[in-house]
Image (cartoon, coloured by chain):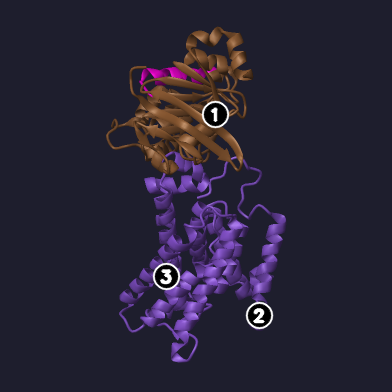
Amino acid sequence: MLVAAVNAQTLVDAVGLGAVYALMAVGIGLVFGVLRLVNFAYGQLVMAGAYTLAWTSAWPGAASIAACFAVVLALSIVLERTVFRPLRTQSPAVMLVTTFAVAFLLQSIALILDIRDGTIGEAASPIGSLNQAVSIGGVDVRRVTLAAIVVAAIALGLLALLLARTTMGLHMRAAAADFTTARLLGVRADRVIGLAVILSGLLAGIVAVILTVQSPLVAPDFALKETIVVLVGVVVGGLDRLWTATLGGFAIGFATGVINGALPTDKTVFLPSAVFALVILVLLLRPGGLFAPGGRTAVVERV
Amino acid sequence: MTDAPLLVVDGLDVVYGRVPAIRGLSLEVAAGEIVGLIGPNGAGKSTTLHAIVGLVPPAAGDVRLAGRSLRGRSPEQIARSGIALVPEGRRIFGAFSVEENLRLGLAARRGNGVAAPLDGVYELFPVLAEMRDRPAGALSGGQQQQLAIGRALVAEPDVLLLDEPSLGLAPALVDLVFEALAAIRERGVTVLLVEQRAQRTVAFADRTYVLGNGELRMTLSPAEAGDTDRMIAAYLA
């Protein structure tokens, strides 16, 4: 019944949503791999990038996007130096609660900056033409959906190459698998963590651009809902390893897109309920994660 | 000993919480020497190695490599200054290929070494060359120990520390490990070897320190390996 209700249009949109969520999942998973830190404030990095796009709307598109990346990367590095690095040896619970605090702090700062003009919310329109639809084989697809799919595929492909083929990637994978042994072999902890944070920030910048094109009204809670859904997705997929976390992010995005398309228009209010019901079902059936290899527990590669 | 010692542990104290693990330990390893460190469980052998590589901070005392203090340095800085540890339990990266494990060892390598350090390890342990593209987790225990030793050797360290390399291995594989150590000795690598197999270690090493309850009990020479009474006395002291 569900399948019958899903058409090509819905599937393309679902893949597009899955692609964006996969990028966020990788951003969260990279930092988790080396720091064992679930960065709840990841959505606020995206939000900061979105505000930058909104406030630089009058600039040429490329300059506005460059400013977005600069702000998100700078914020990532500041967070790493002032918050993540000093707390590196603390328990995961301490680090998680700290990222909650950072998330609310950044939201509050955004609100203070945003409210100066008397209204909450800023409109962004740097690359508005991406929001138009093109018709492919009778299916109307927004250009940004195609862009999201292509950009996500390229970004994830480059990241996979970096991790698999370069020395720095090898060091990152080793740090994620066993940080102490990696350090004993001479892998520089600060450098590996710094690279993970920068890569994670780059992905947040990409997500900020895509999400801002899709929904140009930027408010302090921008990307918050997406972050929560992606965090659920990476846990469902398996946070232990980067590729399962990424698949988890994609899967929850894809499922959200499909359910959204399958639900009658007046029932879309039940979308989160349907998605989370599915999540509960998956976790009941596969508590180790949707993509956890069955029964193989001896060797786990985290990145 | 005519050479100036390469590695010096000087008056080392290590405390876990309020429990002293090492008390006033001093020992020396000269360049090219193979020095053993034995003692019963809980004597502080592994703790000594962990203090040398910067995994646990000393409460007092100092560790010096070629005259330079290592105090306050991070594990990766110590690895890069020329001390390599083959950790207890091998700690290889099972999901990585054999070659990737060896390439990780290059992280601590200093600039002026030989051109192809991996080839040197493949020559020493031919089985690793055969299995270079296989996941390291698929190797047998003895092969994994060879990999762990090879991974430390590619860094071309000044001093190689080994933490119970024969632990958990079948007797035939223990022979393999000691054969590997003999090959390493011929290459002139300086070694500090922590082992449970006391007699074999005393016979193999140039000198062997016996630890008990965090303190140095005595020093044995290879000639004393057959002196069972003295060995037992060292353990019971």
Disc 2 marks which residue? A269
Cα–Cα gap, marks 1 and 3:
59 Å
The residue lying toward the viewer, choosing from A244 and B1, is: B1
Give the secondary structure at mark 2.
Answer: helix
Residue A301 position within the rendered picture, expressed as x and y whole percent measured from the top left: 53, 46
Residue A63's place in the image compared with B222, above or below, is: below
C-alpha distance separating marks 3 and 2:
28 Å
Residue A250 placement (x, y as % from top left): 54, 62
Instruction: State whether discs 1 and 3 lie on one chain.
Output: no
Looking at the rendering, which quadrant does residue A93 occupy? bottom right
On residue A124, the disc is none
Q: Which residues are magenta?
A: B175-189
Q: In front of the other: label 1 or label 3? A: 1
Q: What's the colour of chain B in the image?
A: brown
Is residue A40 placed above or below A180 in the rendered structure?
below
Q: Which residue is mark 3?
A: A147
Chain that bears disc 2: A
* Mark 3 Cα shell of 10 Å, populated few (<14), some (14-19), many (≥20): some
Above or below A298: residue A85: below
